[in-house]
Image (cartoon, rainbow, N blue to C red):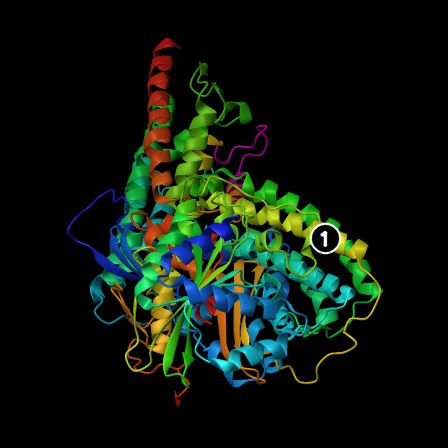
């Protein structure tokens, strides 16, 4: 595991990037052995915000664990709770009414956009441009307001229920969402003009931080990181869950493998999510949001169940090993950023620190989700 | 179909394919029938420790396609097959089967293309001396997953380059996901 | 204008007052400007936020001065002073109008550059003295940046000096009086007889970029790149040590804007030759400072190698070519 090192001298020093560092957006620590500005070797140290969600998953009943899932990733919490309800519905064979499925997709995609918007702002801030963050947060605020009206919370949603939803959407929400879509489209154009075409921005990302398709495969990277490496992989398409197979949307794929490709993937994904939202609003069927018959106590039959979903950061998986009781025997969370981050140690060898941190930003890290 | 290729490769790999094919057919049939829950439970209760072998699973019911259980010694060869067929490593985790005095290590593999096939490899090791060869030489991404599994279950991955606690504090000498763990 | 002790003291006091007031209120201007650019109000309570700078000052001055363990105390203490003092000294020779100048010197340009190179020194001492790895890395960056950008800046200044035939800032500004067509930024210069120098706008651009880089402003603020090096060379500084760095930065911005104004934009001259005076000078420097602020809140940060490449591969060759061209043209006309 040695990358190209441009200058090699005998004198190196250890630089602790983190646990409190502006670029790590949380309590991540990377122990870097530096040769001047070049990284000779990096070792990521995790666990500063480890909360043992997996043990909590074993100690609590299935509905009790549901709020825990949204504490994994505070930016895209909806996708994580979606994985949990899907896994339980798969295990306990609970039917979900169609309206609930559509609203779920709607919410998950809204959440995906809000997560990507925040990432966009934070990423440009990593590169030293502060202003886009303010614009992105302003747009995100509209989405959060929409979701707050229906789900009751702004970040750590607990909106999905096994078999359905906690609350139905009303006409106000639908009209407001329809109004927000053109606004977001306009904003995306503005970001494109303001940031994507900026020469300094492009020079900092083009060809920087290469993560090849082979490296993605060896480390299990998913989500925009894999799609930026030319891998056409999105759980929503490859392994459709919920009602995703009924929507017409594209998976943006870029083959450049650099930080700019990962940036472009996310920016295009927001547009695709808007398309899904539009279709979901058009197709939204009438009907109940909870199934008619649903077991009072969720006791999945003995067995081993896996459910993967595509969250804003990549493929998130839940493995539930059930022993037939109301608690899980084993509750495994496969978080996407954990795998995405694990390739950082190898990828950043021989890079300059500023490029490495730009690459770290392009991985879209949410630390509580890595540490779980 | 990659699923058939992989299944065949695993059947070739495992030394005694004869009893294995019998088991999975019964199991798969049980899965396919409508009242899957009770019947499967009944099937499983008769014979608690699963016999090593290849099992084809219903994706809709379980979320994966092929379920392989093998001896720790056969692990590397099995992972090599997946590596050759462009699978990526989703995750590694453990399960503590305390009644059977065994620790199970579970490897999830998946593919990037539309020929969807999720493969689960399980291997069991005695609880008092859990030793499993590392696959981090084949998949460097397994490095962290194995460290995490070592944190939580105490499974020792032989040949792992850096088996120190990752998520737990660096001086942690406990394994919280073991069923007899008392905080 | 004889330089007596009394004159010098008055000049320095006025310079300090001007620099400090500018620094304090430019911070406010920067924050208000940033707020406007980012669609938020910025500091706006109490008379449009006019009480914000004194409040900041009181806060900084009442904080405890922390010296990190193991730091080189002498260097640590002297670095902020070194950041602030040369900036103030430079004000002495800047002519604000035909009559307002503390001390008009024959080598005014040279003096300003001599003091300006102290800025790099201050950063180096701060980074090294605070015993912080981020500080040291930032110091190394800042020094290489300062060195690289002094070269094209000085070459450009030499071009001006060749054209005007003097290093006295007062004379350089006087030669451009009469109207905007006389300014050095425009290709046709009639200040010293007719002369056509087609590359002068590019010289202006080079000088502008260099003054951004010399004052460590975004997008060239690599010395304090907060997303990489935490806060760069002033990571370990709190209270007034930080305050001095901050004021030094803004004083340097004022100096940079003043220099651009004097060298390229006609100093205190009116664009149409009417009512020349200090108000034109102030208008020009604040317009330039506003553009500095505007740039800072619009662009992301460059990389260190991008920065050095820009200087050594683009700015220096162009400015050298410009120098040669000017020399040739001076012979022709």
Residue C283 on the magenta span: yes
Determine whether, in the image, residue C259 is placed left or right of residue A147.
left
Query: Neighbour class for label 1 at 10 Å: few (<14), some, many (≥20)?
Result: few
Residue B128 on the magenta span: no
* Magenta residues (range): C266-287
Q: Position of residue A139 (x, y in %)?
A: 66, 56
Give the residue pinned by disc 1. A246
Determine whether, in the image, residue A12 is placed left or right of residue A207.
left
The structure residue drawn at horizontal position 65% and vertical position 62%, both measured from the top left corner, is: A108
Determine whether, in the image, residue B45 is placed left or right of residue C328.
right
Q: Position of residue C59 (x, y in %)?
A: 45, 71
- The foreground one among B68 and C226 is B68
Residue furthest out toward the bottom = B182
Q: Secondary structure at mark 1?
A: helix
The structure residue drawn at horizontal position 35% and vertical position 54%, both measured from the top left corner, is: B80
Residue B8 seen: yes
- The foreground one among C265 and B37 is B37
Determine whether, in the image, residue A11 is placed left or right of residue A354.
left
Residue furthest out toward the top = C332
Q: Position of residue B6 (x, y in %)?
A: 45, 53
C47 is higher (above) or lower (below) than C253 = below
| Chain at tag 1 | A
Q: Quadrant of residue A28?
A: bottom left
The structure residue drawn at horizontal position 56% and vertical position 73%, both measured from the top left corner, is: A69
Q: Position of residue C9 (x, y in %)?
A: 33, 54
Residue C173 seen: no
C202 is higher (above) or lower (below) than A292 = above
């Amino acid at each position: 595991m040695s990358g190209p090192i441009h200058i090699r001298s005998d004198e190196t020093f250890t630089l602790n990037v983190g646990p409190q560092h502006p670029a790590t957006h949380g309590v991540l620590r990377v122990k870097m052995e530096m040769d001047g500005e070049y990284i000779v070797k990096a070792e990521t140290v995790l666990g500063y915000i480890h909360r043992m969600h997996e043990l909590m998953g074993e100690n609590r009943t299935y509905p009790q664990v549901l709020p825990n899932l949204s504490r994994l990733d505070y930016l895209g919490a909806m996708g994580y709770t979606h994985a949990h309800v899907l896994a339980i519905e798969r295990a306990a064979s609970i039917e979900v009414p169609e309206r609930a499925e559509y609203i779920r997709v709607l919410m998950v995609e809204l959440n995906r956009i809000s997560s990507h918007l925040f990432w966009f702002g934070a990423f440009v801030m990593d590169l030293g441009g502060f202003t886009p963050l303010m614009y992105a947060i302003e747009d995100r605020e509209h989405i959060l307001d929409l979701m707050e009206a229906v789900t009751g919370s702004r970040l750590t949603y607990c909106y999905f229920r096994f078999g359905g939803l906690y609350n139905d959407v009303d006409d106000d929400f639908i009209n407001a969402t329809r109004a927000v879509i053109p606004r977001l489209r306009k904003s995306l154009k503005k970001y494109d003009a303001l940031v994507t075409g900026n020469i300094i921005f492009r020079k900092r990302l083009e060809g920087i931080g290469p993560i090849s398709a082979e490296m993605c495969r060896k480390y299990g990277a998913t989500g925009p990181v894999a799609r930026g490496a030319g891998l056409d992989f999105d759980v929503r398409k490859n392994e459709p869950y919920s009602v995703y197979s009924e929507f017409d949307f594209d998976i943006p794929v870029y083959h450049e493998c650099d930080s700019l490709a990962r940036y472009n993937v996310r920016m295009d994904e927001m547009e695709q999510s808007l398309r899904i939202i539009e279709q979901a609003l058009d197709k939204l069927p009438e009907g109940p949001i909870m199934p008619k018959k649903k077991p009072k106590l969720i006791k999945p039959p003995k067995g081993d169940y896996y459910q993967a979903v595509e969250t804003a950061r990549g493929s998130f998986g839940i493995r539930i090993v059930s022993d037939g009781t109301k608690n899980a025997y084993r509750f495994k969370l496969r978080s996407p950023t954990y795998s995405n981050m694990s390739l950082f140690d190898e990828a950043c060898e021989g890079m300059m620190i500023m490029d490495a941190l730009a690459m770290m930003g392009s991985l879209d890290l949410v630390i509580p989700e890595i540490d779980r | 179909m990659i699923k058939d290729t992989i299944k065949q490769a695993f059947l070739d790999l495992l030394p005694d394919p004869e009893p294995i094919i019998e088991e999975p057919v019964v199991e798969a049939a049980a899965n396919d029938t409508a009242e899957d829950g009770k019947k499967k439970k009944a099937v499983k209760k008769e014979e608690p420790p699963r016999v090593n072998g290849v099992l084809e699973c219903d994706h809709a019911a379980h979320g994966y396609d092929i379920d392989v259980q093998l001896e720790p010694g056969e692990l590397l060869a099995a992972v090599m097959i997946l590596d050759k067929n462009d699978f990526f490593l989703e995750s590694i985790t453990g399960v503590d089967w305390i009644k059977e005095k065994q620790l199970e290590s579970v490897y999830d593999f998946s593919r990037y293309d539309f020929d969807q096939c999720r493969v689960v490899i399980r291997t069991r090791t005695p609880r008092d001396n859990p030793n499993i060869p590392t696959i981090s030489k084949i998949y460097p991404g397994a490095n962290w997953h194995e460290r995490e599994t070592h944190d939580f279950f105490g499974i020792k991955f032989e040949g792992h380059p850096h088996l120190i606690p990752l998520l737990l504090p660096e001086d942690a000498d406990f394994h919280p996901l073991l069923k007899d763990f008392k905080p | 204008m004889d330089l007596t002790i009394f004159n010098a003291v008055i000049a320095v006091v006025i310079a300090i007052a001007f620099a400090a007031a500018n620094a304090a209120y430019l911070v406010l201007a920067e924050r208000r400007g940033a707020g406007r650019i980012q669609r938020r109000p910025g500091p706006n309570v109490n008379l449009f936020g006019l009480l914000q700078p004194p409040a900041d000052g009181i806060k900084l001055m009442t904080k405890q001065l922390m010296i990190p363990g193991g730091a080189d105390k002498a260097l640590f203490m002297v670095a902020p002073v070194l950041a602030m003092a040369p900036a103030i000294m430079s004000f002495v020779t800047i002519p604000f109008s035909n009559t307002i100048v503390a001390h008009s010197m024959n080598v005014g340009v040279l003096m300003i550059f001599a003091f300006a190179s102290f800025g790099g020194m201050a950063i180096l001492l701060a980074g090294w003295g605070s015993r912080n790895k981020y500080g040291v890395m930032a110091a190394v960056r800042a020094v290489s940046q300062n060195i690289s950008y002094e070269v094209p800046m000085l070459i450009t200044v030499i071009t001006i000096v060749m054209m005007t035939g003097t290093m006295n800032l007062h004379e350089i500004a006087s030669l451009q009086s009469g109207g905007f067509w006389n300014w050095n930024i425009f290709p046709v210069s009639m200040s010293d007889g007719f002369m056509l120098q087609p590359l002068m706008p590019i010289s202006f651009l080079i000088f502008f970029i260099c003054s951004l880089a010399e004052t460590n402003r975004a997008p060239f603020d690599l010395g304090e790149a907060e997303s990489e090096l935490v806060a760069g060379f002033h990571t370990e500084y709190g209270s007034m040590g930080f305050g001095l760095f901050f004021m030094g930065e803004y004083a340097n911005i004022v100096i940079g804007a003043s220099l651009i104004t004097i060298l390229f934009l006609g100093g205190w001259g009116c664009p149409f030759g009417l009512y020349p005076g200090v108000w034109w000078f102030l208008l020009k420097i604040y317009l330039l400072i506003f553009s500095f602020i505007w740039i800072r809140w619009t662009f992301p940060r460059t990389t260190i190698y991008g920065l050095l490449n820009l200087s050594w591969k683009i700015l220096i060759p162009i400015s050298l070519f410009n120098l040669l061209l000017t020399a040739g043209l001076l012979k022709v006309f």
